[in-house]
Amino acid sequence: MNTDVKYKPIYERTAALVGQLVRASALLESIRTRTVGVAWIPRARRDALVRHAHYSSRIEGNPLTLPEVEALAEGRGIKAEEHARREILNYLAAMRWIWDKGIKAGINEKNLLAVHGILTGGLMPPRESGHYKTAQNAVYRGREVIYRPPPPEAAPILTRALLGWINSAEAKKEHPVIAAGVAHHRFVSIHPVLDGNGRLARLLEAWVLYERAFDTNHIFALPEFYESDRERYYREISEARTAGDDLTGWLEYVAGGVVETLDKTMRRVASAGYSEKPSDLRLNTRQEAILNMLSGGGRITGSELCGNLKISRSLLSRWLKPMLKARLVLKEGSTKGAVYRLP
């Protein structure tokens, strides 16, 4: 088999697609002007984390409710079947890994398989979790095979070709929503792992948006749109394949979903009463990293923050001071024994 394979997606920048991209960018800019330096960023981020894990897993049949997923994200116990609980905990961990390490480390084969390992840890045998498939898989509807992906020997070759395109100059010049939508569809069509392809494809899509700085604050969850009409989601994937992998219609669908999701995010923020006036605080990358570490709902000591960020206590204090003043972060306890959490 030829291992020197390159991937070049097929799509047209139709008026409908361009119009949705313009609307998506305008909505995002509106959200950014409201989110910089206001106290509800961490809450919106945590809400998006929960919604991403819930709706993406629900597409694959996970039975847990949104409040149950929220409880797991906050570290609270729930009464649920172990497999369903583990799926959610793994998804939350995979999202946090992408936030904490994956954006800086980049989208490459090693990291992609590492995310699959997190996503399926304890749910698949170790030889399958975090590894390419070694047997033929298929997509079923009931007992009927509705899609048979490329064979195992092609999985690494086609995945590397996709990753090559994602990291190419061509893809990086493209609108982030187009790059993310292409990555989503191509990955789920390759189906390179035995299980978890759909969840990993949606994580990859989000990862591209994060890396391209489209969702810098991580405050919206596109899987909520896909799950709202699951039949259409599957139909759009299938129709692009039957059209000779022309992704034009699929990208129009994804871009429309981004617009709808961003609009819902704006309305959710407004209805939640997060009406604080923006401060003059502008977050640097390390301050954003602090928010990421706290986004799971737990409490972290100053020593742990210093260790994770590899900075001195005095520098941590300097960065935390404006965040504490703006109530982006709360401090509990005395200076030496203090712990930090989100509001």
Image (cartoon, rainbow, N blue to C red):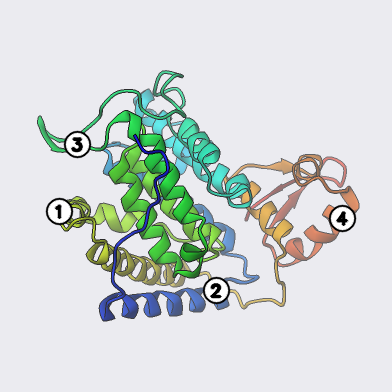
Task: Give the spatial CA distance, label 2 vs label 3.
Answer: 42 Å
Residue at image location 88% in from the left, 48% down from the top = 312
Instruction: Judge the density around disc 4: few (<14), some (14-19), many (≥20) Cα neighbours within 10 Å.
Output: few
First in residue order: circle 4 vs circle 3 = 3
Residue at image location 81% in from the left, 40% down from the top = 303
Q: Which residue is more in the foreground, 112 or 82?
A: 112
Left or right: 115 in relation to 259? right
Q: Is residue 66 visible?
A: no
Left or right: 193 in relation to 317? left
What residue does disc 2 label?
32
CB contact under 8 Å: marks 4 and 3? no
Residue 241 location (% of width, % of height): 20, 52
Look at label 4 and name its amino acid: Leu
What residue does disc 4 label?
315
Look at label 1 and name its amino acid: Thr
Mark 1 vs mark 2, foreground winner is: 1
What residue does disc 1 label?
242
Look at label 3 and name its amino acid: Arg
First in residue order: circle 1 vs circle 4 = 1
Residue 22 location (% of width, % of height): 39, 80
Quadrant of the image occupied by residue 178: bottom left
